[in-house]
Amino acid sequence: MTAIQLTDVRKSFGRTEIIRGVNLTIPKGQRHAIIGPNGAGKTTLFNLISGRFPITSGRIEVNGNDTAGLAPQQINHLGLSRSFQITSIFPRMTVFENIRCGLLWSRGHRYSFWSLLGSQKALTEEAEQLLERLNLSSRRNVYAGLLSYAEQRSLEIGITIAGGADVILLDEPTAGMSHSETDYVQHLIRTISEGKTLVMVEHDMGVVFGLADIITVLVYGEVIASDTPANIRGNRAVQQAYLGEEAA
Amino acid sequence: MSTQTSSAAAMSAPSFLRRHGLWFFMLALMLVLPWVFYDHEKGRHSGFAITLLSEMALMSIFALSYNMLMGQAGLLSFGHAVLFGVGAYFVAHTLNFIRASGLPIPVELMPLVGGIGGLVCGVLTGYVATKQRATAFAMITMGIGELLTAAALMFMTFFGGEGGITTDRVVDTSIFGIPYTRPIQVYYLIVAWAMIAALLMFLQTQTPLGRMANASRDNYERTQFVGYDPKVIRYWQFILAGFFAGIAGGMYCLVYEIVTFDTLAAVKSANALLATYIGGAVGFFGPIMGAVLVVGMQSGVSLHTSAWLLYLGVVFIAMVIYAPGGLLGLFANHIPIARMGRLGELVVPYARILVPGLMMTLGFVLFVELTTHQTINAAQGKKFSLLGFAPDPGGTMVWLSAIVAMIGGALWVRHEGRFFMAKWNALIEDAKARGIVA
């Protein structure tokens, strides 16, 4: 079964074509990294898959469903969840409430205005367990906007996985982090993506080669290679286009 | 932390009282206040006080319903009075219908009828307004407000034109056998409904919809990616806000027995905004404080001066600049310092700022009152007086002292303000160091 299937996906902003006919198949359970130089269209590709922008032409399937014309929340209901390159959390709510908001829909709460959340013991417990896994239990009642940058990134990963989506898109999860923070987040991603499909855009090659089963290289809106880390490392075209000395 | 207390302890009576003490305090206050103003010589209630208290209660509900949009969902509405006014018209027509048809619909249910009116209006206008958020939402609500105000003057049968719809609450359908001939009887009915409405709005903040309204306020895009449609959240929140605004409108109709187009006009909407902002949109109880203050100024200060609206404007601007969290925010800012037990250290800085502050305020008030006297009141042959003093409003000395007090006070306040802020910042830094504030 495939989690994500892209068929000749194109996206133009005005006259500029940013994504120029991408074909990509990501099977279920794979950890997949998308790399490429700045401006290659990695984040745009994420925005197309998650429904933030509509595609210009082509076809995107998530868990076997065509996503054409679907709003982000509808694509979320197909089992896909994402994080953002620029941290996207609920800053004026507590850490606990952030996580609980991530849980609500998938636990069937919808738009209810008659059930009190305080009496939902199971929901509270679940949110607290997730906080434990994220190492954020001690920050439970702090406004999310007051957390440190690294804590906010962890929290966003928490919100992303809380709903139990089986396809997870992470956009530069370790950007701007110190070495120790990066190590911690890499470990966190490994555990939370257990048994799920993970797609991530990442610049830290240590994280990419440490986590990914398959690496796709995107240059100027086109896929120039999609292969195992070992083969990508040896791929001359990739070396020329992107990796340069970093991988050498 | 207090949240770690076991559920058994939380159920015990003293802690229940402590946790919900504010509610009991508000109820007790509302029940007792009419008797504070009781006229023992004449043996009756003060009509002015009862009307004032009724207005405060119903405006509190109106402001709380406004805050369901502003504070909770981050939606700035300029047309909230539409929901209030339609609720009020619904009740006026219902009362007239009861009188004409003899149908035994209890008077006690009239606020609920108003709520249904507001809800219907919310379903219709919210459908258009909540498609958008931010500035577009604000513009649409403003447009709807103007549209309905214009319609109110055109469609006579429902809105009654400029004269409005008059009604009579004494229809003899009370389930408790209360005639509602006296304002105090209506007041207690309003207290009951205000408590119910406030409690329901409070509980609503703790439901999935209430929390997701916060979420969509903070970050509508993230809201989508956790599976919610922000438009649907906004629409439901708007409809519910309409319901509670309608309840307030229903109370209004019971108190005044006349509903005119200005119940749904822009000034009424602005009042909700002012009350919510001055009280503080960040916490649940803020709008109540704001409503009490705004109504107090409207009814109390307006008795003494025709410039009351100017004073309200100055208070509003000062709050926006110096206390964006409103009155509630001002109180909340002191909590960490109180927790350290060092509130006493602020007494001197406060006193030092209070003296020049008072001087500046008095100077300003004197200046404004002299101006309004010379431009308006003098022509009406009124005598000038302020706080019991009656200086000659044409004299140079009185004008000069007003200006000196105003400008001198302002400069002095600025000077003392620096001293105050230094002390304040030191205390907050200390609180941070001790981990009391994040």
Image (cartoon, rainbow, N blue to C red):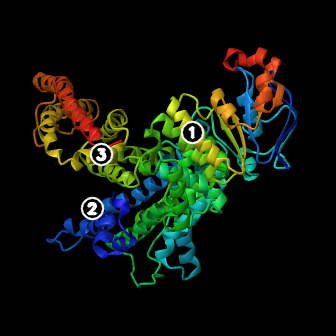
Q: Which residue in the structure is indicated by mark 1? A: A185
Give the image location of residue B238, x and y in percent.
58, 53
Disc 3 chain ID: B
Q: Are marks 1 and 3 in contact (CB under 8 Å)?
A: no
Tell which subunit mark 2 falls on: B
Front disc: 2 or 3: 3
Looking at the image, which residue is at 64% across and 32% down?
Answer: A207
Between A230 and B219, the residue placed more toward the observer is: A230
Q: Secondary structure at mark 3?
A: loop
* Left or right, A217 with reference to B236: right
Residue at 47% in and 43% down: A144
Same chain for the residues under marks 2 and 3 in the image: yes
Q: Which SS class for mark 1?
A: helix
Helix, strand, or loop for circle 2?
helix
The amino acid at mark 2 is Ala
Q: Residue at x 55, y 35 (%)?
A: A183
Q: Amino acid at mark 1?
A: Val
Query: Distance of mark 1 from mark 2, alpha carbons?
Result: 63 Å
Chain of the residue under label 1: A
Residue B28: x, y in percent? 28, 69
* Residue under label 3: B436
Rendered position, B244 above or below A79: below
Give the left or right position of residue B229, taking residue B251 as reference: right
